Amino acid sequence: MAVAFHALNTPAGLKKLDEYLLTRSYITGYQASKDDITVYSAIPSAPSSDLVNLTRWFKHIDALLRISGVTGEGSGVTIVGFAPVSGAVATPPTGDTKAAAADDDDDDDVDLFGEETEEEKKAAEERAASVKASSKKKESGKSSVLMDVKPWDDETDMKKLEEAVRGVEMEGLFWGASKLVAVGYGIKKLQIMLTIVDDLVSVDTLIEERLTVEPINEYVQSCDIVAFNKI
């Protein structure tokens, strides 16, 4: 069954999407696809910064669309219901939204999976096509990178290490999912994904001039590239 989201113009719908993105960099799969465009198009405005995971994903997709668009096919995603709420930023499509509005009264009742009507499916496809058409530009090469970030010892605060790494901001650099991997003797390394625009970011420069210098080198001993793939 394809992934489906409810009422993304409501606080409850956005909260569920934020929770869904807690362990994911993209809506489906391991690269940006049409599924991301479909969901991006259904969100009326930039989400609140309180929704950390959703904000990260939204900025990433927005940047990709501005650069060259998204070409991945995805595995299929649908948007179910556009329940109007007081103070909503955008006017939702007309139609019967009572069921979606009722779901929003209780976050626990909001289901990520469900069926959509033909009208909703057509509207979502039209919005996705409109976003893609308006964002077409000369394509710049992009790469997906998997990097190991190693601490000094087992006493290094890995939470602060990751915060320091993600705090590095560069045009064309987008941090993705991460995890801690045990390497022995109580030491763990941070394994993190990132997407770069090749014309704007050099991974070697990123490591040598941003990730292994003060003040980050208080936590980071070294960085190694595990995988490097053109997108």
Image (cartoon, rainbow, N blue to C red):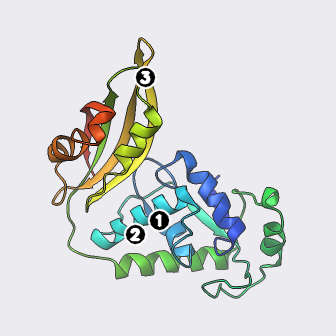
Q: From the viewer's perspective, is 44 left or right of 104?
A: left
Q: Is residue 38 left or right of residue 197?
A: right
Spatial CA distance of label 1 from label 2 is 6 Å
Give the spatial CA distance, label 3 vs label 2. Answer: 38 Å
Answer few, some or many: residues within 10 Å of disc 1's Cα (few below 14, many 20 plus, some between 14 and 19).
many
Q: Position of residue 22 (x, y in %)?
A: 57, 49
On screen, 221 above or below 154?
below
For residue 155, the mark is 3
- The answer to whether residue 159 is seen in the rendering is yes
At horizontal 34% and vertical 33% (from top left) the residue drawn is 219
Q: Which residue is mark 2?
A: 62
230 vs 169, nearest the viewer: 169
Q: Is residue 144 depicted above or below 63 in this figure?
A: above
Which of 225/121 is in front? 225
Tell me the kind of residue under disc 1: Phe
- Please state which amino acid type lies under the numbered disc 3: Glu
Residue at 54% over, 67% down: 39
Counting from the top left corner in percent of width and height, residue 183 is at 39, 18
